[in-house]
Image: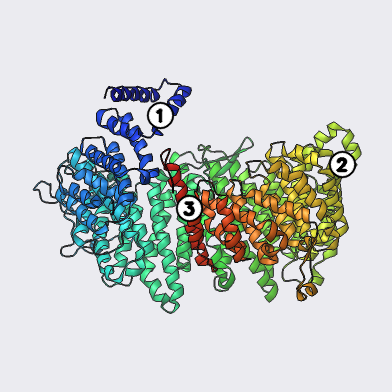
Amino acid sequence: MASDENSLKALEDLLSEFFNAVTSNDRKREIEELLNNFSQTQDAWKHCLYFMSSTKNEYVMMYCMTVLEKLINRQWLSVAGEHKMEIRSTLNRFMLASHPMYILKKLAKLVVDIGRTDWPHFYPDFFSNILQLVHSQDTVMLGVVLLHTTSEELACLEKTSAYILEGVLEKHRHLVAATPPPSPTHGESVSKKQSLQIFSSSPLQSDSLLSNIFKSPGMLIQLEALPPLDKDAHQLCVLTLNCLSHYFSWIPLSATITPSLLSTIFHYAGFGCEARSCGNFSVNTNCLGVLAMNCINELLAKNCVPHEFEDFLLQMFQRTFYLLQKMTKDSNTNATGNRLADLEEIYIEKFTDFLQLFVSIHLRRFESNANFPVIEFLALLFKYTFRQPTHEGFFHCLDIWDVFLDYLLVKLNERSADASAVISRYREALMSLVTNILQKIMFRFNQSQLEELDDETLDDDSETEWQHFLRQCLEVIAKVAEIVTAEIFQHLFTPFNENLEIYFGVEQFTSEIEGKRHLATTGENECRRLHCTLRDLSTLFQAVGRLAEHFIGEHFPERFSDGRVLLERLVQTTVYGARTKLYLVTSIAQTVLPVDFTEVHAQSIATIKAFSPWLAQFYVESERTNQEKEKFATLMSSLIDSVVPLFSKEVPDKIIHSAAHLILSITTTIRPAFLIQLPSFQALYAKASQGDFSQLQQEVQVLLYRSLSLYLVLPWPNIPDSEQDWVNRAANHSTFVKQLSSQITQLKDAKLLADNKSLQEQAMPVIKRTLQIFEDWIENIAGEVIKSKQIFYQSLQDVIQTALAVFPVYIKHPDVIENIMSFFLALFQGLRVQMGVPFTEQTIRTFMNLFSREQLADIIHHESTAAHRVVEKFLKILELTVQEPGSAFKSFIPSIISISMDHIYPIIATRQSPDMKQSLYHLLHELVMNNWRYFFKGNVLMKLNCERESMENTEQFNSIMQAYGQSFLQPDITVFKQNLESLESLNTKWKLYSKQSFHEYMLFQFLNVLIQVLVHKSHDLLQEEIVVSVYNMASVDFDKFYADFLPQFLSGSEGLDDSQKNTLGQNFKIEKDLPSFTQSVHRFVNDLRYYRLINSSLPAGSVTL
């Protein structure tokens, strides 16, 4: 006994020292090693039971329970029966003592772990013991903890547990004062209700419609006023509701979930509807409301609902919607009159989750039910949405409306005959929704809230907080527009026109003073109103642009007049903005108004870009019908004249960026033939050729140069090929390219460049910038017609030759080489046909000669992302080469294999990082897939004569397959999956597994590796794919698999005795269909794992039979 006491004292000292803040990490590692050594001793559990019963040190208790947990989970099967009984009874006794909750839960976990293994044969009273604990007033909390843990670990006991938990809640439900429940309208102010104009603007907001809609006899939730609960009672309610929530997450809808149980849960859920400041409700009571909503949401999340439970669910929804009605009534406890502002935020989140689940899963069940008033429900949802106290809550509600609109759209598509009736039923609700969303996003109505949104910091989606808020709202409006397009357009166009007229009137209030233009408004209120108008105009530009898709295609004829009016206004706005340059005007609100003017100008241009498909259709139709051609030409000419001057340093970047995107849309989407004749467009080419845009942002330069290039090579729409003027356009394009590339083509003398270090440094940014521009051109021309690509390639001849010439000079500069490799990769991908075989060969040979073994090693060991990308791009070029069918490219195969397997593979094979590995294995796959005859010589005659295919280049083939096998031994799951799919595709097309060289010399190695992966669970996410591959390999010769491979595999398996190996072999059923074979493999792997676990947990000196 003295020894145990000394050991306990030493353990307490060690653990106290370990958790002391001043203890060094080295000392902690020493203590950890001591504790681990102790836990592995044979009788450690006995000491731990003594320590737990004799200490009050919680560190010691947790450590001892951890030791017992390892014993129970890893060695329990080998523990003697009397020892099991001792451990179990000691733990049960220890649970009955008073402990902190986390200790109690850990003890419960140990007992349930024992029950999971021993019940029902060796622990038959496991469940009955738990039920006895729950039924006793003194141990009810422990019983609930055990029930919860049992649900987490065993997922059973559904019916009994639910009834028991209902009883626990019922007992505490009736521990209430004898005060009458407050009425649903208690404490509400009529004057407050009338003052909230934003919520009375819609017919959906009439409280008279909603006052009794979700009330029916016996359905009211009587919220009894709970006195403050003591700590134990509150904790018991929390534990019970959490436990119920977990049970509801897996038990099916059945008789277990009774009306009385639901009534009890809803009683608790109602507590969350009461204001935090309400005198009759304590804070801990509100917490119970949140937990009760968790229970309700778990029930609601079940998609599979038996038919007999639909009425039951309907009653549940009506109960919850009564709560919703109560939450959306006005309040007199805060200045806004918004009851939601008084409720716990987490309770609102749970209630919103409920509404989301109802609309997404169950609305379709009840929408046509006469007993379910769907319009009134939407009215409540409407009020709930626009009274959300937080932006996140508002977004969550918009998601619900989004789901509802998706449901409506599906319904309209499925029942097109009834579409008008469905739209008529919901039109009023949808228009009210859009009206209030518009008020929510417009500064005229909601400035104070909108000004709080950050419009500078970008999130992970490259959006500011304001942009995210606006996009969420506009997406809902756009979805409503799919149902009632004309009404929504008119709804937007009216305020759009009003704000636009104010914007047009600003010019008359500007004056020039000492060479500077000034806005002649001195009143702060006037500036504030102008600020709101400009912000709202920017918003409405985006809203209108989001509707562009409803004006094109089949909708073009019927909405042409509206579209033309709108585009004329948009072009007028752009012309006005370019002429007035209001972003340069100064005012007393200098920090605000210039930004607003810039935003309006940029958004007006962006909106025209959104309507570029409409302009393209207008152009095609005007050419086809020979009508309104002059109108279109005037519109386009005005637009170009107003946009081209914007590419200037004095113009804000945001406007320039929008203008560049619009020019790209005009030259690629619309492409009017007369564009090149416009003086302003010709001026754009002249400025680009002279380098006037070099001071603009790189992205803007790329967009501009791409626009001007593509316009010259893309065919004009609706014009025959004979009238495309290809000769002049090709000459213009060649001239344009020469002017842009004049600096880089001067570097063609590689020897001069190599000898001049200063010139090399100066040329680096020129090479990088120019090749980036031309690479962008190639990527965008790759999918176009042959004529366009021919013109394009001819123009780039000098640039391509120069890039190839300077390549050796910069071989030691990965950042420059990366740009050159990217350029050539784009050439190979987009213009390979135009390049022709001779030049392609020359290019490949140049790369292969320069990328020697030493050079590749230097680049890979450079340890920079640019260096790695160089190698990846080189491998990609080789991959494109091996895919070519021509005989000229076949001569490269030996060299490509040598570079891949002798130069690159040895360096990257042992690297933990997957960098470059995927690219290399992609190359190997394409090489084998597209050049099978390089390895296997065969023809139709040999097949007819049943002759075996002869094999060549065997050593190279074997090295490739060994590289595949090596990848299966590494932890990277991405490469593993890629190569497994590669082998399967090779087998599907070429019968790889049946080839003699693979079947006789490699098959067993691959099978062994794949099954070992299954046993070790190292790539469990690919379990199904691995088993399918094992089946396909085994199916080549099932007899050989069962007779030879399986015994060979078992004989080499460590951690098994001979008897276990024989059992495993006998239990592996001889199955030849995939489902049965899959079951056999899983059973085999699980049994093998089980035997190893048992053998590793046996005490030292155990004798196995």
User: Which residue does the numbered mark 1 point to in the structure image?
Assistant: 35
> Is disc 1 surrounded by few (<14), some (14 to 19) or many (20+) residues within 10 Å?
some
Across and down, in percent, residue 1060 comes to 48, 52
For residue 810, say whether it is visible. Answer: yes
Q: In the figure, is residue 107 to the left or right of 540?
A: left
User: Which residue does the numbered mark 3 point to in the structure image?
Assistant: 1059
Across and down, in percent, residue 167 comes to 17, 53
> Quadrant location of residue 691?
top right
For residue 826, say whether it is visible. Answer: no
Q: Secondary structure at mark 3?
A: helix
- Mark 2 vs mark 3: give the one in front: 3
Residue at the (39%, 56%) spot, across then down: 436
Residue at the (67%, 62%) spot, across then down: 993
Q: Secondary structure at mark 1?
A: helix
Which numbered disc flags the more N-terminal residue, 2 or 3? 2
Q: Rounded to the nearest whole Å, what is the CA distance between mark 1 and mark 3?
A: 36 Å
Which numbered disc flags the more N-terminal residue, 1 or 3? 1
User: Which residue does the numbered mark 2 point to in the structure image?
Assistant: 747
Q: Rounded to the nearest whole Å, what is the CA distance between mark 1 and mark 2?
A: 70 Å
Tell me how many marks there are. Answer: 3
